[in-house]
Amino acid sequence: MTAPTRPPRAPQPYPVADYSDSAETTDGGWLPVLVAALVGAVAIAIAGVIAGLVVVNIRESTAADNPARTPSASAPLAQTSAPAAPVRAVDLPANQLDQVDLQRGVQLVLIDSYGIDDVRDVRCPAGQSVILGATFECLVKVGSTQKSVSVTITDSDGTYEVGRPH
C-alpha cells in the first residue's frame, strides 16, 4: 500500500501566502524594538530581585527553624502582630544579660515589631540578672523625646519581651 500523494503544482509546490504591495505595514522603526528590549530588561531585573529576596527569606527561615539556644528579645504577643526579631543576649558571669546586646535588642524590637522608625540612644541598666519574671526599664530616645520601655524576662534562658515606649 502506498501513501496518497497529490500531484505537484509547478509554480507553487507548497502553499505560499499572498503578498500585496498595498497591504498596510507596522513598520515603526527601531522604537518598538527598543521599548520591547527595555521592558524585557526591567522584567529580568525584577525577577532577579524577587529571587534574591526569596533566597534571603529561605536562609532566614532556615536559621529560625534551627536556632541556637541563646536568649532572645521579643515584643509581647498581645501588643503586636509582627513577629519580633530574635536578638542574642549573651550570658555573662552570674547569669546576666549583656548590656550592649540588650540595648541593641530593645532597639530592634521597637523598630521591627512596633514600627517606630526614629529610635536612638537606648540605655539599659548594666548587670541585669536573668530571673524569670523580672522587669526593668530602659530609656530610649524616639525622635527628640526621651521615653521609657519595660523589659520583662520571660524564661531562664534570658529571653525577654519589650513593651511599648511610654
Image: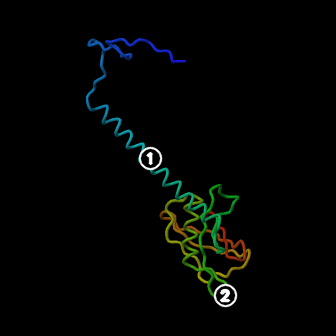
| Image coordinates for residue 17, horizontal then vertical, percent | 36, 16
| Above-or-below relation of 63 to 17 | below
**Could you tell me which quadrant the C terminus lies in?**
bottom right
Comparing 141 with 31, the one in front is 31
| Image coordinates for residue 38, horizontal then vertical, percent | 34, 40
| Above-or-below relation of 125 to 28 | below
Pointer 2 with pointer 1, Cβ within 8 A: no
Give amino acid for label 2: Ala
Q: Which residue is mark 1?
A: 46
Q: Earlier in the sequence, mark 2 or mark 1?
A: 1
| Image coordinates for residue 96, horizontal then vertical, percent | 64, 83
- Residue placed at 54% from the left, 77% from the top? 100
The tag on residue 32 is none
Furthest residue in direction front, as rendered? 1
Give amino acid for label 1: Ile
The label nearer to you, 2 versus 1, is 1
* Secondary structure of residue under mark 2: loop
Disc 2: CA contacts within 10 A as few (<14), some (14-19) or many (>=20): few
- Residue placed at 67% from the left, 84% from the top? 95
| Image coordinates for residue 108, horizontal then vertical, percent | 55, 66
Instruction: State the image quarter where residue 165 is shown.
Output: bottom right
- Residue placed at 69% from the left, 76% from the top? 157
Q: Which residue is mark 2?
A: 94
* Secondary structure of residue under mark 1: helix
